[in-house]
Image: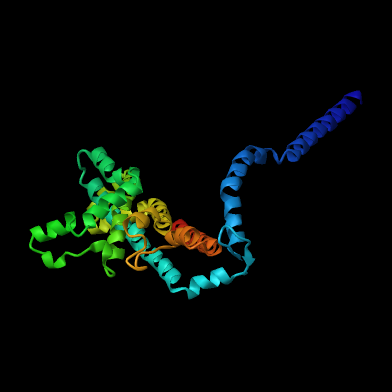
Amino acid sequence: MPTSLTRAESTTAAAGRGGKSRTGRGGRWYVPYLFILPAFLVYAAFMLYPLGRAAHLSLFDWDGLTLATFVGLENYTDIFSDDRLRSAFGHALVFIFFYAVLPVCLGLVLAAVLTRAKVHGLSVFRTIVFLPQVIAMVVVAVAWRQIYAPDGTLNTFLRFVGLEALTRPWLGDYTFSLPAVGLIGTWVSTGLVTVLLLAGMARIPVEQFESARLDGAGAMREFFAIIVPSVRAEITVALTLTIVASLKTFDLIYVTTSGGPGSSTTVPSYEVYRRAFELGEVGSAAAVGVTLTVLIFAITAVVNRIGERNP
């Protein structure tokens, strides 16, 4: 009998300790959040608060100096009614092709050729194609402005090969200025995309290509059936980075064309600067910035959603 009581008491004590331990762990649910709190505070101070402040300013007509006047959503409706702002957002979408779609297509082909051809000195090639990413965009813009100048490298080459009829002031032409600036973005983005895809293709097992060859698959079949599905995650990352870069580009436009000729190359980021610092329309500039932020979030969310789907 004493033995039974002792066992019962031990069982009760153990249950009590276990229950207390579980309760203690449950009571400290907030501890993990304390670890991320410092980082969140920094993020909130430098990202969330400025974004919220910009959203607040977008509801006012304010020149940055005098008292502001509440106008509600008028600054946002102006984005759809103002021809220049509509053009700016349209140009940003065009830049997605030059900054994202075209570099991904070129990067896929380049990376596939370099991977399958077993090119010697691949590390040197990676360094060369990645160089545009480490050069300041202002330096890139100045260099390409010289190339596109009426007496610049491009027109000089066209005259040399007998194509003088094609020469023109590329950055001053209403038709060709936007594609000319877009091709600079293609040159900058292609190296980053190629390096990302090379890293992804390096993980593809060689056995997959050997099996495909035994089944009679050619180079094109290998490309679309093995390479592209295997680098799906890298393509998603590349598209996300390049789309964000295309939509928020400012320094390239500012240095090369300043949105001209006319408004043929203006983009939302440049309009934010122009309206806030040149025209004194801070509320309108804030509305453009908030709209651009929402557009970037929406497009990148769609891209990542599609990239996460099972093939």
Residue 70 in the image: above or below residue 219 = below
Depth check, front residue: 2 or 301: 301
Q: Position of residue 80 (x, y in %)?
A: 49, 73
Q: Position of residue 279 (x, y in %)?
A: 48, 63
Residue 138, image x, y percentages: 34, 49
Q: How is the image coloured?
A: rainbow
Above or below: residue 44 compared with residue 229: above
- Left or right, 220 with reference to 100: left
Looking at the rendered image, the quarter that the C terminus falls into is: bottom left
Q: What residue sits 19% from the left and 55% below the top?
A: 152
Picture quadrant where residue 180 is located: bottom left
Q: Residue at x 41, y 57 (%)?
A: 243
Front residue of 225 and 269: 269
Please provide percent x and percent y for residue 120: 19, 39
Which part of the image, by quadrant, shows the N terminus?
top right
Residue 230 relative to residue 32: left or right: left
Residue at x 22%, y 54% (from the top left corner): 147
Residue 303 visible (yes or no) = no
Residue lying furthest front: 66
> Farthest residue in the right direction?
1
Residue 251 visible to an observer of this rendering: yes
Q: Nearer the viewer, residue 43 or 70?
A: 70
Q: Is residue 119 left or right of residue 99?
A: left
- Count of all numbered marks drawn on residues in the image: 0
**Residue at the top extreme, as displayed:** 2
